[in-house]
Image: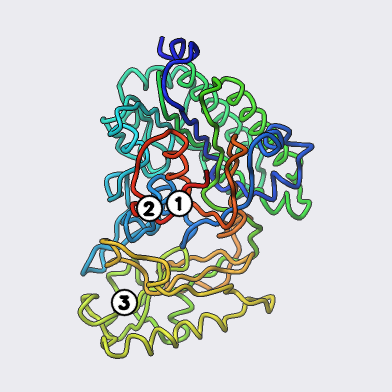
Amino acid sequence: MGLFDRLRGDGAPRVAFIGVDGVPYSLLSENEDLFPNFAALADEGTAGEISSIVPPESSACWPSLTTGMNPGETGVYGFQDREVGTYDTYVPMGREVQADRVWDRIQEAGRQATIMNVPVTFPPQRNVQRMVSGFLSPGLDKAAYPDDVRDHLESLDYRIDVNPKLGHQEDKAEFIEDAHATVDARFEAFKHYIEEDDWDLFFGVFMTTDRVNHFLFKDYERDGDYKDEFLEFYQKIDDYIGRLRELLPEDVTMIVASDHGFTSLDYEVHFNAWLQEEGWLSFNTDSPEELGDIADDATAYSFIPGRFYLNLEGREPRGSVPEEEYDEVRDQLKADLEALEGPNGNEVVDRVVEKEAAFRGDHDDIAPDLVVIPNNGFDLKSGFKADSDIFTTGPRNGMHSFDNTSLYVDDADVTIDDADLFDITPTILELMDIEYSRGDFDGASLV
């Protein structure tokens, strides 16, 4: 077997990357007694808090993490993007990612990659030795390549994702049970292919952590009813990280990272309702269902999470903002956003990022003009229901954060100072002794 050959000392250095979607660094670093395997990774290697991307949304984060490039290069800005020159929207899938993934570069160098459960990778690529697509895959039957992988995963009761609808129930017991079953099968799959495949890069993601955080994070932070269950789930994650680390031969460097942080959620903010109330947005119907109902006199509209577009002449089909007024109108919208307060009197907005500060590349023509990074507690929505309140509460009590993203590298020579998601791909290539051009990435190696 390939792994046996590796254990005899053959081959170049390898990397095993394990993603823990949405896990904040503070959760792990402040509870080292509960999470001894993460603590050991930090003590024996390097660990720290890094920054996510703008916007910190998983559908945009994973393409950026796996390419080392900003959304202007990847072409993916969030769970929902818009077509150029229209008001039509679509959900970006793997084929919409317009930049080379780290495993593409691995394959081009004549090395092998096994990729499992990475969000925004459906349909699975056939230029790698093995891939199981993650979040956004319609089902396991079409998400696994080659076909024999599906048969093995079905024997494990493997599922692409936890059932998030269970988290909407007041009693979270069924949701927690499903989360454990999902992560148990994921671990068994990772373990099997780490042992069986002759890989140079193993890249697998636990996404269930993000799901648990969405429905239980405030219980952890504020001593809620499910705090113990939350910590027990993360103790299992810690145990699985430790067991996977023990499987790895000495020529493998382990990296564990999240794509964004997490914090407690107090209010959901429906920004299209706010834009309507403030006179920035109007629709052609009394009950708008989609962006296509936007009126000719609308000035701005919003997508999740906190992405704002001016209704610009020459860019939008019914643009109302003249190009010469772009800066003035955008500055006014930015000022209005910065002044917004929540029902508790707290400022909703931490900062507003202008398009040119965050996005550059061949695909910045669909970039938002402004992106809001919220203060903790305010989860940014859009929505097109005319009767929606601006501030609401729902079943979720946790939300993404830009800061507090986690990075652990089992290498003491790695330095984590002012690092972000863009640094991970060049770091993997450096650790694997694969040549690349520094100008290929928005980040840089941390080795």
Q: CA distance from mark 3 to mark 2?
A: 45 Å
Q: Position of residue 369 (x, y in %)?
A: 37, 74
Task: Assign a secondary structure to mark 3.
Answer: loop
Q: Return the residue nearer the eye: 404 or 136.
A: 404
Q: CA distance from mark 2 to mark 1?
A: 7 Å
Q: Is residue 323 left or right of residue 26?
A: left
Task: Assign a secondary structure to mark 2.
Answer: loop
As drawn, the label of residue 441 is 2
Q: Residue at x 76, y 43 (%)?
A: 31
Does the CB distance between marks 2 and 1 fall below 8 Å?
A: yes
- Please name the amino acid that badge 1 sits on: Ala
- Please name the amino acid that badge 2 sits on: Phe
Report how many numbered discs are placed on residues in the image. 3
Task: Assign a secondary structure to mark 1.
Answer: loop
First in sequence, mark 3 or 2: give its number: 3
- Please name the amino acid that badge 3 sits on: Thr
As drawn, the label of residue 444 is 1
Q: Return the residue nearer the eye: 105 or 91.
A: 105
Image vertical order of residue 349 relative to residue 422, above or below:
below
Image vertical order of residue 355 relative to residue 213, above or below:
below
Quarter of the figure with residue 263: bottom right
Q: Return the residue nearer the eye: 67 or 386.
A: 67
Image vertical order of residue 88 relative to residue 91, above or below:
below
First in sequence, mark 3 or 1: give its number: 3
Q: Position of residue 339 (x, y in %)?
A: 57, 84
Q: Residue at x 29, y 28 (%)?
A: 110
Please name the residue that numbered disc 3 is placed on.
Answer: 285
Q: Residues within 10 Å of mark 1 (few under 14, many from 20)?
A: many
Q: Is residue 182 left or right of residue 202?
A: right
Q: Position of residue 383 (x, y in %)?
A: 43, 66
As drawn, the label of residue 56 is none
